[in-house]
Amino acid sequence: MTPETAEPRPAADKFDDDHYPAYTMGGAAEMLGTTPGFLRSLDEAKLIQPRRSPGGHRRYSRHQLRIAARVRELVDQGTGLGAACRIVTLEDQLREARDLNDKLSPPPGQDYPPLRGV
């Protein structure tokens, strides 16, 4: 199902969807070389909120696993978990702000429009 609708999606669409919750906690922990407890701590910190299977088990997407891998990298370098989560959040916000700035900036060689009321 897509996040916007309750309609099922074709299976082929799920292969390329970075947000499809395809990985179990055990599989995700194995891929990251960490423990399920580490993933639970990211959920408790509200950095990653995995979907739940009908049985209540956590399911992770590739996008979430990339975030978890970045946090693990920072933790492995000696950063505390809370600080690592905050760093990753701020990096994501900065990336979004830069993307928005690039989108709203005039093309090269074109001036900004004049300010009104100044």
Image (spheres, rainbow, N blue to C red):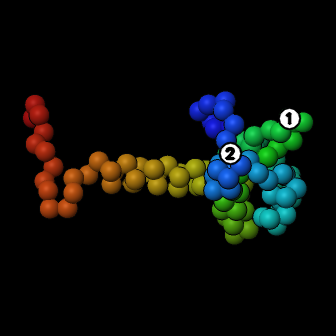
Q: Residue at x 14, y 56 (%)?
A: 110
Q: Nearer the viewer, residue 18 or 69?
A: 18
Q: Quadrant of residue 50?
A: top right
Amino acid type, callout 1: Pro
Q: Nearer the viewer, residue 40 or 85?
A: 40
Q: Is residue 108 left or right of residue 35?
A: left
The answer to whether one can see residue 118 in this image is yes
Q: Secondary structure at mark 2?
A: loop
**Residue 111 in picture, x, y percent from top left:** 13, 53
The answer to whether one can see residue 45 in this image is no
**Residue 104 in picture, x, y percent from top left:** 29, 48
Residue to which mark 2 is pinned: 10
Q: Residue at x 10, y 42 (%)?
A: 114
**Residue 62 in picture, x, y percent from top left:** 69, 56
Compute the Cα span from label 1 to label 2. Answer: 19 Å
Amino acid type, callout 2: Pro
Q: Secondary structure at mark 1?
A: loop
73 versus 1 height, above or below: below
44 versus 28 height, above or below: above
Viewer-nearest of discs 1 and 2: 2
